[in-house]
Image (cartoon, grey):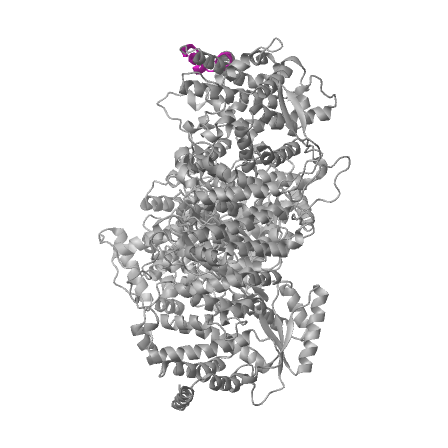
Amino acid sequence: MAEGEETAVRQLRMKWQESPFCGPELYRYLAEQVPRIYCTRGKTGLSEEEEEMVGTTLLRPLEWYLFGEDPQLGLEKLQQVSGSSQLCGRVFKEGETTYTCRDCAIDPTCVLCMDCFQNSVHRNHRYKMHSSSGGGFCDCGDMEAWKTGPSCKKHEPGAEGDTDMGAESQLEDGLMERARMLFQVLFKYTVDMLVWEEGQELPAELQPSVKEDTYYCVLYNDEHHSYDHVIYTLQRSVQCDLVEAQTHTNLIDKEGRRAVKRGTLQACHEAKQAIQSNSEHISLQPLRVEILHSAVMAHQSFALRLGTWFQQVVNYSVGFRQVFCQVSLQAALDPELHCLISRLMLCDAKLYKGARKIVHDLIVCSLLMETEYKRLFAIEFAKNYKQLQEDFINDDHERSISVTALSVQIFTVPTLARQLIEEGNVVKVIIDTVMEMLSEHLDDNNRFHFQGYNSERFFRIQVVFHDLKYILISKPTIWTERLRQQFLEGLRAFLGMLKCMQGMEEVKRQFGQHIEVEPEWEAGFSIQIQLRHTLSMFQDWCTADEELLLQGYKECYNTLMSCTNQPFKSEEVDTHMCNHVLRFKPYKVSQDPVSIHLPISRLLAGLYVHLCRSGAINRLHEYLPAGCDIAYMVEYPLRCLVLAAQVAAEMWRRNGLSLVSQVYYYQDVKCRDEMFDKDIIMLQIAASKMDPNHFMILILQRFELFEFFNRSTVSRDKELVKQLNRLTEEMLHLLIIILGERYIPGISNVTKEDVTMREVIHLLCIESMAHSGLVKALPDNENNETGLENVIQKVATFKKPGVSGHGVYELKKECLKEFNPFFYHYSKSQHSKAEDAQKKRRKLENSGKALPPPDPPEFLPAFANIVNVLNCDVLIHVLRTVLRRAVETSGKLWTEAMIQRVLHLIGQGLLEEKQQLEANREEVAFDFSLKARRIEHGKSLLTFLEKLKLVPPLEAQKDMITWTLQMFEIVKCLREKSSPTAAMSIETTDPGESIQDKEKAERKRKAEAAKRHRQKIMAQMSAMQKNFIESHKMLYESTPQAQGPGEPFVPEDSSAMILGESRVALGPKRGSGVVEREALTCILCQEEQEVRADSTAMVLTACVQRSAVLTQCRGKVLPNTETFEPLFMHPDLACGTHTGSCGHVMHAPCWQKYFEAVQNTTRNRLHAELIFDLENGEYLCPLCKSLCNTVIPLIPLQPLKLNYDNAELVGQLLTFPRWLEIVLARIKGLKATSQANDHSHEMAENPFFMESPADFRSILSFGVQATAQYSESINEMLVVCATAAYRVGLKVDPNETDPRVPLMSWNTCAFTIQAIENMLEEEGKPLFGSLQNRQHAGLKALVQFAAAQRLTSSQPVVQKHFTHLLSGLIPDLNVDGTSSILDIDLFHLLVGLVLAIPALYQEEAVDLQPSPISSAYNHLYIVQLVTMAHVVQILLSSDDPPGMLGEEEGEEHRSATELYQTVVQCTEGLSGDVPGWCLTDRVRRGVAQFLRCAGLFFSCLTGVPPPEVLSSNEVSLEGQLEALCSYLALPTNLFQLFQDHKDTVIPLLHRWCGNPAVSTALNDTSTVIRYPRKRNKLVELPEDYSCLLNQACHFKCPRSADDERKHPTLCLFCGAMLCSNSICCQETVDREVVGACAAHSVNCGAGVGMFLRIRECEVVLMGSKTRGCVYPAPYLDDYGETDPQLRRGNPLHLSPERYKKLYQLWQQHCIMEEIARSLEVVNVMFAFDWQML
């Protein structure tokens, strides 16, 4: 600050301090200064200069006044005496990662920020991590939030900077007084301006001296209009261009409002009308637009800036924070007015987004950071709760930016929650708020009816239920009378709400006609789901105090009895069955209204179980002297269960899917614990209290089966009988559940852990399941815990995943005995799957198929009478009737499922009797077996059971029948008090032993018969072979095998045979290629055809793509492909062209038809452009669905037989120097022929042109032959493939006449071989024999295509290319722009020279090509020349220091030293002090990649098999190099080449090393490519995913300074961190706007990208700017599963196998294919805009 400004600030401060109250002076100062700075230009944002003026002119004087001196000095003094807070309080931004400890957090809302978590003890506990929705803050340091470890190292008491000084004592009296006065004035000013509603006038105290006639048209954010709508409206209304409209829209969405026009009042009015008019055309609701005077706008902007300033100031000191809290909570002078913070809260819904965020952050960092003021704020919040929620309901903004979202920070604090309940009865307040909002949905009977509800408003109302859950989440340990009374009051209010739900949305069975309009049902179930945990928490609160539990049960019972819904319409009647009479009121579910919503009945059942569990049931008579009406209590749950049974019996089909959906959710894991399970409990309560026969009669009546079992005659209506049978099955199943489901704490002596264990056992009996699948299938509690981890190790073993899939749990064998086929939480499909799985298992184990009921735990005394239902006369009658019908009648009145359930019930009865007999040898009243033996009408139940084995349709149940009969014998022995040994022996004997013995014997007999048959066939074949040999003795005697075993067969021309079989690919000793007849089958027409040069082309599917897999300079800007000449590939391999093939063969015409059909059908698909690039000719392989965009024609390999004697003679004449002279002479002659003038003078200085012009045709004298002729079909496919390589590799339009076409064909051949060699080396596989047959066929076809392609090109063009390529090695060919040797990839050069040299043999009138002998020497000398150049390249580029010492002795070391000294003499700037052994080592390591690639190339080109040692991965580097040199006819000592051709090579060395570009490159060593090239890897990822999240947490967007949510995305190729899917980092590529990832992939991966979206924990594969897919991240949790979007939140660790799979996907060029397959499988309805990623 300048000295003059500093003086002015001091004077201003003195002036304010002299006045007794600085408020008026401050207001006058702000009234004049604020409009001068803010909104003086045509925009609302501040420039850097204006922002600095705000600091110096407005904020700096305030800070001088606050500290009474230089703020910097005052702050330093304050920090010396002031300590930091023990609370972290970091406010989370949207998307920021949060952590919660499952072991220590009081509830799931207690979270830690990244820094606190990393420095806390919870890092080693069971934790979860999630992405914040924004608005919450870190709970580190909050003692009430954590059971242990409440503070991290930074915030624990006694940490550096922490102090226990209590508060205001940290501030001096004068400082405190100034702070209070300044805060009062400024915070009031802030509140007044933020809630100010007069757009064109200011408060009197802020009126400026001169009022300007300048206004703003301000557009506000809403959630009704999309981005595009707003952009379109702005373009039409305020005449701005697209970019400006997008900027306005983005800022409106981010900040909540934006001034879109500045001008006079009239101009702003016109703009407002235009905006509203244009927006109404798009949406029924117009955009919110207001006109604000520039001064009003200025003061509101500064008020917002003060909010940020307050946040900074309160963080300076705890004292400042407490003073601010006092000011904000200070009561107004007028009792009817609210305090300042309440005013802000009550106006929150009227504030725009930016203002809300600042206000909420200010509340968090001040009021919520101080315990006492947090309590006072909570009281204010509770006072205004109803109004705040009403405002939120009527608002359209998300909850995360509403002040109501702060409820989670208040209600989850245990002490605050209890205080709010005691003092403000907040439970009743919340429920009353909900009821008031839902009152519009009450019908005449005071029950909810949601038909035609507003879904958006209803969703907002449901949010209030979260607050009810928060307030109840911590159960009190100490109860006061006040707390007890207030909670009971809240419980009554809650019961009042449940009363409105009891019986709501009744349904009535539809007869005759199908329902026309599906009734609304989702709303009722969504409330039920929201209340699920709340219902259990109310029960938990009641169980915490016995008095409260009894009183709560009384209130619930009285509320239930006061419900008047679903009344009985008839008087009581008597029913008789088995000499038992029940008096009841008639009711039929199939005819009368019924509701599935019975929350009060279910709450009552839950409370009753808690009474029994705690023993308080013994005092229930004190609160309900008249007792309970059990029949009334059970009536409605029983109706609901009957409804579910009738829906399963398809009796309600005409009621549509709405009822089916309700029954589904009624039994689903999301609702069942407070719906279906509680109904079962209520029936168990009734069964324990009622007479068992009466209970059974009631069940039969409500299931409408009374007459079905009480009469001998039944209706002949088949549909009715089918329904009755199905209802019987459902009723029997219900009885099995009532009698057998005892795993409920309070019903039997089990724990919650036992319950969870049983659930897990039955889930795993269906199939082995992943951890996430188990968690989804288990009910969770209010803390989102299922208890799975506590039991899973006891019942299951974990099977780890492979490179795909996920880990699964398999059930332990010893737990199978707990399996119950009629487990009550099984759905129909789960029941079938579990039963089938267990029967298959038992079959594999050779045990019986019987699935008996497991031994149940005993009922507690309160429920002990339930077992009497098994023993009652009515149930025995029902069981006997079902069995009698199965034995005596046809299959119309019974089903196998019915019998299965009856057998299970009988088994339950026998097990119960057995348990009681074993437990008590005295008289046992439970006599199920005796009643089953009792004879009625001549037969007993046991008699029918014995006859049941003879019923043919029940073959599958025979094992179960046998087990049941055995149980009868066991019980009989126990009852007769005899030794049960005999019976037990029956039991232990396998029930199906006799059957299985027969089956085993039958299988054994068949196996022996098959064996005898095979032996007979083999004997016949042996006899036929002997007869054939006897008949053809002469043939066998003439074969080599006829000679003696020690005499090898030697042909006449043994030397030729040995050379022909030699494994040398080049030169005069080249072996014969393996030429086999290829007869292939077309995958489309299935016809076989031989691959021949004169036949229709056979083609391989192929995909050509640009690749940066081998790049040594990632991120290099690629040249303009329109003008780029791809003659020399740079050794950095920045962007190559890869051609891959899946190896599937088609006829060319078949492929053309298929391709045209695919093109036509694909164009009509939705979002087809995302799957296929039709312009690029893409399609999927018809067989394996690999992505393809061209085909490779199959070219038959030509036999290359050498006359080795002639070859040796030619070799004596055609030495390397002579060959080079002849080639250069040919080039000169071709130039002379093609040009009108003679350019011989241009080459006069070339030392190689010494021969006369007669040497022009000398090249032909060493052997020529006719050029191979291919069919028109093959030539056409050659053009197709070459054009594809040209089009894709250069990203240009197709042009088959472009001279670059042959170059791109050779380049893609070379690059593909390099990529394959790199892949094999990286995977540690041998060079030969590792590729799959189809991969090898594809590579061989590619090389043969590249060799044949020149025949479809202009021969002069190919000759010119050869000349230019050779100029890279022979620099005196007068070719412009020749590159230095360091700028050429010599393998690409080798491939180009080898494939182009046949064009030199072309004559004007005759098509010629070199003979096999000429080709052998051409290849040999080209390889030697290029290899020597590569050795020099290695020596020039190597700079690695010598490693371990080596020996200087040896010819190879001396040769290396001699060569290197020559190179040093020729090169400027090259160090000459390198030992020979080091040079040898450098060359060996550096040349290996080149030789490996050359070996692959010549193997596919010539067909000569390589040495066997190259097919083994156990060979050393030296052995491999020796074999490769042998195969390529090179000396093992490569330096020998320089010795052998010294006179020829020395001039070349001078030209190679003397090139100025070489010296320049050596001076800038960063640009020199070293050999061997480094093999690219994916970036190294941390083992713990938290480390990546930590990086993302600290990621700052390079182009944006705001704190808005970003999507940090890691490029797995180079490790760059990008800001993806964000407007701030968009770039323009090829005149298109793309996102950061799409732009990055263009240069980093040649258009292909692999990115890890860190906060989403998913990999994104990009194949182009417009195509991509999501791929599982390589991070797995402890259960072997990925966690996209961090939904589960389990700790994640890197899986090396998954990451290696990603690496292979990249190295093998399968990313494009993976994207295409992914998009093909997924139905793309709403396409993702990959271009903007």
**Residue 702: image location, x then y, percent:** 65, 30
Residue 1523 makes an appearance in the image: yes
Considering depth in this image, is 516 or 1100 the residue closer to the camera?
A: 516
Considering depth in this image, is 397 or 1469 the residue closer to the camera?
A: 397
Quadrant into which the N terminus falls: bottom left
Quadrant into which the C terminus falls: bottom right
Residue 1464 vertical position relative to residue 1659 in the rendered view, above or below: below
**Residue positioned most to the right:** 512
Residue 1095 makes an appearance in the image: no
The magenta segment: 980-998
Considering depth in this image, is 840 or 815 the residue closer to the camera?
A: 815
Reply yes or no: does residue 1038 show up in magenta: no
Residue 328 vertical position relative to residue 1284 in the rendered view, above or below: below
Find residue 1464 and report its image quarter.
bottom left
**Residue 296: image location, x then y, percent:** 58, 80
Count of picture labels: 0
**Residue 1387: image location, x then y, percent:** 44, 54
Residue 834 horizontal side relative to residue 245, left or right: left
Considering depth in this image, is 1633 or 1683 the residue closer to the camera?
A: 1683
Residue 1071 horizontal side relative to residue 1464, left or right: right
Residue 1127 vertical position relative to residue 590 in the rendered view, above or below: below
Reply yes or no: does residue 994 show up in magenta: yes
Residue 324 horizontal side relative to residue 934, left or right: left
